[in-house]
Amino acid sequence: MLLKSSFIPIFNAIPAKPQRIFLLSLSNTFTQQCPPTVRQNATLNSITSSLLLQRKHPPKSAYIHLPFCRKRCHYCDFPIIALGSSNTPAKNKDYNDDDPRISNYVDTLCREIKATKLDSDNNPPLETVFFGGGTPSLVPPRLVSSLLDALSSKFGVSGDAEISMEMDPGTFDAEAMEELMNLGVNRVSLGVQAFQDELLKACGRAHGVGEVYEAVEIVKSCGVENWSLDLISSLPHQTSSMWEESLQHTVRAQPTHVSVYDLQVEQDTKFGVLYSPGEYPLPSENQSAEFYKTASRLLRDAGYDHYEISSYSRSGYRCKHNSTYWKNKSFYAFGLGSASYVGGVRFSRPRRLKEYMDYVRNLEDGVVSCVADGVIDAKDLAMDVVMLSLRTADGLDLKCFTEAFGESLTRSIFEVYRPYSESGHVIFSDEGGRNVGTDECMSLVSSEKLAFLRLSDPDGFLLSNELLSLAFGVIAP
């Protein structure tokens, strides 16, 4: 059964997507509940490992939050600035160029980037840049250029960097697409969400299905090789046949990547006022689970690799930027409400525009720092590693985990997952990739030949909240 998420998101910097199957959580919401025992402290905190040191490595990725939208979607609770539905590059090329809300915000972003302190003079160039929002395609290309220039001047940008931009149908034309490509944007995430006008209208989207087909044609005709199509399941009044139809249209569009998100009804949204999760006109939890299974089956049958809980790709087209999150690597973040992860410490910017601009002024004056000093707690790190690794089809590297956190913790996690291994929701494998039964697992742990732990697709992914809670209970009881 699909479980509702009770976890709190930690990555405001991850592009705003509605999702109920699995949400990232704040590790210290668990660690603050109960102090660790002496034995646990000895097991976890006394270990110096490459994993701990890796969190000190300078980031090679940057997320840029561009909060502008035509209007707020009914499911969205992220920090945005609504510009109005009639003024888009495709309809009025001069409007956004002259909009002071956009130009002033971009100027503030550039100032934040410039004021960011570097740990050393040997920081590597950025290998991924992600423009998320909001609707970044509402920002004129010349202002995107100024942001890329600011990043290049401050950090350097690798010549083969993956530079992604979220774009909505109806907010760009071929001319704008070509300008962005000339600037270096080489990956597009197209926010389609559904292929039925009634569903798009029901969730407050500013585009229709006709604009979806136009956007797909623009992306293809401009020669964008690496592009993703985003869908949402469990929308109000959405039926199984509608969902399957959207998936079929997606496969026919031939994107190199597909993201599938399950609707999360947030309290302070229009949907939060109108609907209760699991109650009509929203699908039931069992129906939502079937939507997830249908997506997994149809997309895998069409040749897409289900490499992360919400992500599917053709061979060679996994999103490199999002893989930074799943591998728990450091990353910069800039802009309204965004959250960075630098030096093992997460740092969030204000969600309100005035407070964010005050923050940037204070950053320039040295009153605040974008990186907080702090000691990396091994229990928090262990939970982050488990939580993020189990999002992926690759799963948790047990050899590295055991090296970092000790054999006893690996054994404890195995024991709590034993029933789920027997039911097929959790899969263990050895160094050769062979799936290992529960009777063989314990001996392989001792011999260091038990290599990976992953959740099965789709049934294990659907139980991810429950399975993560069990692991957290072992790490920080």
Image: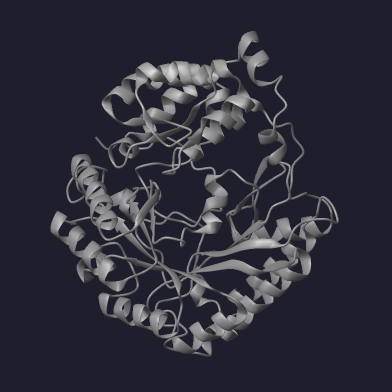
Quadrant the N terminus occupies:
top left
When the figure is inspected, residue 209 is found, relative to residue 203, above or below; the finding is below
Any part of residue 140 in sight:
no
Q: How many marks?
A: 0
Residue at left 40%, top 77%? Answer: 85
How far from the left and from the top, in percent, is residue 221?
A: 40, 85
How far from the left and from the top, in percent, is residue 462?
A: 31, 38
When the figure is inspected, residue 278 is found, relative to residue 204, above or below; the finding is above
How far from the left and from the top, in percent, is residue 252?
A: 26, 71
The foreground one among 224 and 475 is 224
In the image: residue 97, left or right of residue 57: left
How far from the left and from the top, in percent, is residue 256?
A: 39, 66
Residue at left 56%, top 53%? Answer: 13
Farthest top residue in view: 38
Any part of residue 172 in sight:
yes
In the image: residue 249, left or right of residue 217: left
The foreground one among 477 and 323 is 323
Residue at left 41%, top 72%? Answer: 168
Residue at left 74%, top 31%? Answer: 375
Quadrant for residue 23, please give it: top left
When the figure is inspected, residue 44 is found, relative to residue 136, above or below; the finding is above
